[in-house]
Image: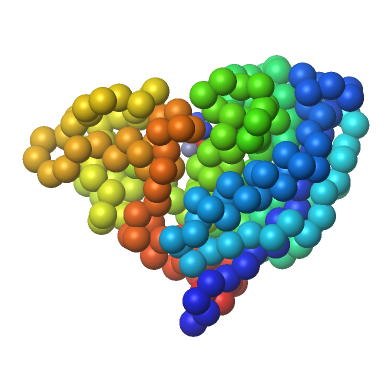
């Protein structure tokens, strides 16, 4: 068992034109995004290193890539790199179709074997640190989406009953929290809602932590489904 496993990251920037609104992202912002996830995962035994950045000019993919779209399949089939343990990140605009209005989405570890090319995280380019999307421009969308990619569910999964997120040190929550509520306790008994957790839906500035139990689940999922020695 290693103290920390370092995962390879392949970054794919899809743009419509040379502007920020068109999806252009400088290398400095990608470096800041890597620094953000490394800080946020620092308690989990996982770290990330950028291996390569691909720049793809495609207005069609920038606008239309979304969950289960033909544009997503075409993009990922051509550009996904590395094995099951490699984190592939695509930044797009989510302008049309199924993806419209999303901050990001991710595939889960258990789905790697059936659809290896589909594996990865798709992010709205304006969510990167210093991007133009107020309240969601500190890079926590990638922290959250890579959490799914590493096997975590939302803290509000299953509401107040049952297994919830299958992590025993995250308090149950009836539904997603937004903004940064002062006081929120939606399930009877137990602790207040985990609104500061990266796997809730609060503002980037409100999200501060993974729990030790989430770290344990991440490592187990990465071992079982992604062949990571951790
Ligand atoms: N809504 C998105 C999802 O379910 C991401 C939420 C990210 N939240 C944030 N504060 N960046 O995957
Ligand atoms: Zn999510
Ligand atoms: Ca829980």
Residue at the image point whose x is 58% and y is 42% from the top: 142
Q: Residue furthest bottom?
A: 1
Residue at the image point whose x is 29% and y is 40% from the top: 194
Vertical position of residue 6 compared to residue 195: above or below: below
Residue 6 in view, yes or no: yes
Say whether residue 26 is left or right of residue 146: right
Q: Position of residue 137 (x, y in %)?
A: 59, 29
Q: Position of residue 209 (x, y in %)?
A: 40, 48
Say whether residue 207 is left or right of residue 66: left
Q: Nearer the viewer, residue 92 or 3?
A: 3
Say whether residue 117 is left or right of residue 111: right
| Visual colour scheme | rainbow
Q: Nearer the viewer, residue 71 or 88?
A: 88
Q: Position of residue 89 (x, y in %)?
A: 70, 45
Residue at the image point whose x is 45% and y is 62% from the top: 44
Vertical position of residue 8 compared to residue 158: above or below: below
Q: Residue furthest left?
A: 189
Residue at the image point whose x is 82% and y is 55% from the top: 52
Residue 117 in view, yes or no: no
Number of numbered discs present? 0
Q: Nearer the viewer, residue 83 or 13?
A: 13
Q: Position of residue 221 (x, y in %)?
A: 48, 63
Q: Quadrant of residue 185?
A: top left
Vertical position of residue 61 compared to residue 111: above or below: above
């Amino acid at each position: 068992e290693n103290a920390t496993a370092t995962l390879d990251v392949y970054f794919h920037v899809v743009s419509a034109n040379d502007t920020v609104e068109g999806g252009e992202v400088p290398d400095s912002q990608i470096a800041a995004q890597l620094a953000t996830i490394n800080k946020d995962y620092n308690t989990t035994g996982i770290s990330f290193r950028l291996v390569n950045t691909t720049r793809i000019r495609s207005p069609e993919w920038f606008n239309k890539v979304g969950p289960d779209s033909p544009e997503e399949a075409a993009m990922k089939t051509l550009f996904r790199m590395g094995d099951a343990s490699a984190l592939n990140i695509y930044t797009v605009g989510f302008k049309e179709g199924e993806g419209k209005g999303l901050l990001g989405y991710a595939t889960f570890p258990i789905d790697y074997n059936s659809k290896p090319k589909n594996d990865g995280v798709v992010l709205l380019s304006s969510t990167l640190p210093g991007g133009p999307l107020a309240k969601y421009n500190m890079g926590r969308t990638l922290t959250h989406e890579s959490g799914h990619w590493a096997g975590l569910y939302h803290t509000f999964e299953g509401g107040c009953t049952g297994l919830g997120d299958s992590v025993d040190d995250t308090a149950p929550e009836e539904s997603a929290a937004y903004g940064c509520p002062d006081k929120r306790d939606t399930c009877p008994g137990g602790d207040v809602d985990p609104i500061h957790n990266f796997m809730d839906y609060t503002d980037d500035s409100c999200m501060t932590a993974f729990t030790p139990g989430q770290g344990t689940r991440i490592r187990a999922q990465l071992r079982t489904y992604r062949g990571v020695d951790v």
